[in-house]
Amino acid sequence: MYELMLVSKIGKGEELLSLVEKNLKNASAVDLVVDKLGKKPLAYTIKKQTEAEFIVMNFNVDGAAISDLTDILRLEQENLLRYLLTVRKNKKIKQKKQALKKEEVVIKEEKAKPKVTVVTTKVKKTTQTSKVVKKTSTTNVKGKKKI
């Protein structure tokens, strides 16, 4: 999964978007999602521009097609101010890995926590006779007592 952010001149975003989409379709990209963020002010001037159009694209494509795409973007001087291409991990795969790690931790904790039984004896003395009282309490590893 790749994410491409394009920063284009005002009014030139559609031309740039069609160029990139055409090249991605030729490279047989799948799961193409385009999100137009609109016109935003720039933090500093780029090529005498103070505002720009922002476009974010998410897609899946082979790694060989990425070099062709970056070559095209590097040569595009007229409409494009900046671009950023990043590899984005799929959230579903990441969530599955996290769930598996949590299950492994729970299993390890269950194996690591032996139940401890503590028997305490209290002797109460009265004036007449002495009585022995036995109480059984269970303590788990965290130190909490259950009586």
Image: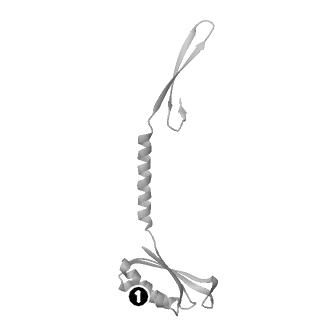
Q: Residue lying furthest bottom in this view? A: 78
Q: Tell me residue 38's x, y (percent).
A: 57, 83
The residue lying toward the viewer, choosing from 49 and 124, is 49
The answer to whether residue 64 of the structure is visible from this angle is yes
Label 1: element kind: helix
Q: Tell me residue 18's x, y (percent).
A: 45, 89
Q: Tell me residue 58's x, y (percent).
A: 45, 76
Asked where in the image residue 59 lies, by quadrant, the reply is bottom left
Q: Which residue is mark 1?
A: 22
Q: How many marks?
A: 1
The residue lying toward the viewer, choosing from 113 and 133, is 113
The answer to whether residue 5 of the structure is visible from this angle is no
Q: Tell me residue 96's x, y (percent).
A: 41, 59
Asked where in the image residue 42 lies, by quadrant, the reply is bottom right
Residue 26 falls left or right of residue 122: left
State which quarter of the image contains the N terminus.
bottom left
Asked where in the image residue 125 lies, by quadrant, the reply is top right
How crowded pointer 1 is (Cα within 10 Å; few <14, some 14-19, many 20+) is rated as few
Q: Residue at x 47, y 87 (%)?
A: 73
Q: Is residue 102 above or below residue 75?
A: above
Q: Amino acid at mark 1?
A: Lys
Q: Residue lying furthest top in this view? A: 128
